[in-house]
Image (cartoon, coloured by chain):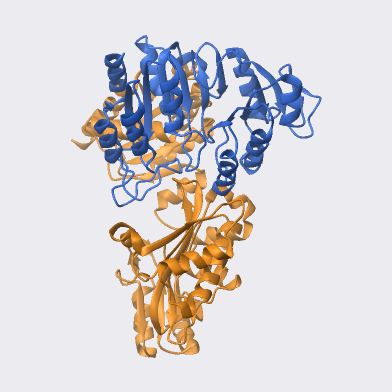
Chain colours: A orange, B blue
Amino acid sequence: MRLHEYQAKQVFADAGIPTPASQLAETVDQAVDAAEEIGYPVAIKAQVHVGGRGKAGGIKLVEDKAEAEEAAEAILGMDLKGYHVSKVLVEEAVDFVNELYVGVTMDRGEGRPVAMVSTKGGVNIEEVAEEDPDAIAREHIDPAFGMHPFQARKVVYEAGVDREVANDVASVLTTLYQLWDDRDGADTEINPLMITADDEVIAADAVMNIDGDALFRQPEIAEMGEEAAEGDELEQKADEYGFDYVRLSGNVGIIGNGAGLVMTTLDLVDYYGGEPANFLDVGGGAKADRIANALDMVFSDDNVDSVVFNIFGGITRGDEVANGINQALEQFDEIPKPVTVRLAGTNAEEGMEILNEDLVTVEHTLEDAVQRAVEYAKEVEA
Amino acid sequence: MSVLVDENTRVVVQGITGGEGKFHTEQMLEYGTNVVAGAVPGRGGQEVAGVPVYDTVQQAAREEDANAAVVFVPPAFAGDACFEALDARGIDLVVAITEGIPTQDMARVYRKLQETDTHLVGPNCPGVITPGVAKLGILPGNIFSSGNVGLVSRSGTLTYQVVDNLTNRGIGQSTAIGIGGDPIIGTDFIGALEQFEADPDTHAVVMCGEIGGEDEEEAARYIGEHMDTPVAGFIAGRTAPPGKRMGHAGAIVSGSGTGTAQSKITALEDNGVPVGDTPEEVADHVEDLL
């Protein structure tokens, strides 16, 4: 779960990391008032979960009231890479001489957290990581002990940070690690961490991604997350239903249980000449109403011409699934899109007997089911 | 023969009094698994499905000679349950079924694991099965058949699918290991492949991977350098768009071309592993390898 910049900055500032003066605004008037109060120049920054906001026109530097008005009007309400901008952060423009990158994340390969510092801040750090990996100094942290102060210093010196500010940068990094640790961070980053002519260190951006599985013990963050939710209407609906769901560009709707099997179903749709419309994993042990919700999700996507159900029961039971499918379809006078079902595993035979074959097409193998669904989609298209 | 699990495996079920714990204990017993104890704090002295319950894993291990633990504990407490099992004397296999354990908890468990000789399988996995002998976890026993093909997979339901394709054409399995789809897991592909390589009765191995991370690429190199037992592969997620998370925490394609299905397939093929386009094709490859 990702926080907005203004939320992450609040968390950082509360922990003692210096941030620029800033105010959140939802209208042009609020934005101009904020700019006047903070004093020019200020940056007006769209609050959406999109990388490269600056390049896309979502961040503007303004020198006076007229410019502030113009920028706020342009940014508020704009569509930024598919996200509607409803809030801007109005922020003191920091006069800097250097920009750093500092971050803490989980290194999956090592199974340990890693702290990173680079003097190539202010740019896309993923690109730096790829083109010039040596430009990022890294230090792995033993999660049993946390980050020792010497480790923070070590990675800061290794990155080549100026010695005048090295202690302050190390202190920011130590705080950042502590936040990552305390708040169940997935990634916490500051890019750029600005260095001023007076050797002040200021977090000009703030990224905080939280482990969604740990929100039960992070109630404050979970509350912020509700406010931060945004994106595709269907994806929000999937969140409400608690599905792993990804919308794709094709027309064959796919519902299955278990990420690996659902991905395999997507791949087979492609293999047999169709195009997947979505990834929808109902998860383990789904009961009838959950199955009905999944169908509702996929039916409400206008791009879908045909639906394939692929369930291989382990913990999930075929009879429950069949009841859910019947239950969902019986409410229609006419089935909106053809549904093909393949059930295997736990209670699959019982499920096959329960399924109403007036409402769905039953297939016995994965391959047959996918091919049938692809055929249906092509018929609708033709 | 088999790996990790055999007729000497004596299981303690952590969380045996919960819905999942009880149901799957019954399933495991029905399959013939030697479930000798349960462990739930505060429930010592009770019985579930005829199995005695202890307050701690250590008591269960001591009183009932348990040597393996299966974790059915809810996510908030599952990290602690793994620690308890790793800390208990005599337990040399821990299978963690629980999905949704916070990653930082698993990082600490993983750290502890490095100090022990215990095998951890999972979390967020279907478990381990040696067909006809024992299953530890939630795998549907009836689709498996006994034989000489080892199977290792990051995905539970994909394991079932591939096993079904194998069983349907009369190819039995020595052991199937679901290693789980989380970013931090105990036994990884290489750990499982090492076990299969050392098992004289495993004549071929199926490895089912998916997009995300670089575990499959590393496993491919391991196969090329260290394995005589032939391996067939399958990779899920060829059609996944970059940057989107597909269910499993690990199943995300980074924008830069690492962790993609193609990079994994290429790595496997470069190391002599035939990769099926479909689960049925994987079974074809296994038939050729045997």
The image quadrant that residue A375 belongs to is: top left
Place of residue A249 in the rendered image (x, y in percent of width and height, measured from the top left): 28, 45
Q: Foreground residue, A362 or A88?
A: A88
On the picture, is B103 further left or further right than B246? right
On the picture, is B52 further left or further right than A332? right
On the picture, is A376 further left or further right than B89? left
The relative height of residue A104 versus residue B154 in the rendered view (above or below) is below
The image quadrant that residue A53 belongs to is: bottom left
Q: Foreground residue, A118 or A44?
A: A118
Place of residue A3 in the rendered image (x, y in percent of width and height, measured from the top left): 50, 62
Check the image and name the residue furthest to the top: B170
Q: Quadrant of the C terminus of chain A?
A: top left
Place of residue B128 in the rendered image (x, y in percent of width and height, measured from the top left): 52, 23
The answer, for residue B109, to whether it is visible in the render is yes
Residue ID at (38%, 70%): A119
Residue ID at (21%, 37%): A381
The image quadrant that residue B207 belongs to is: top left
The answer, for residue A265, to whether it is visible in the render is no
The relative height of residue B284 versus residue B221 in the rendered view (above or below) is above
The relative height of residue A18 versus residue A123 in the rendered view (above or below) is below
Q: Foreground residue, A108 or B165?
A: A108
User: How many callouts does the rendering have?
Assistant: 0
Place of residue A343 in the rendered image (x, y in percent of width and height, measured from the top left): 42, 22
Check the image and name the residue furthest to the left: A382
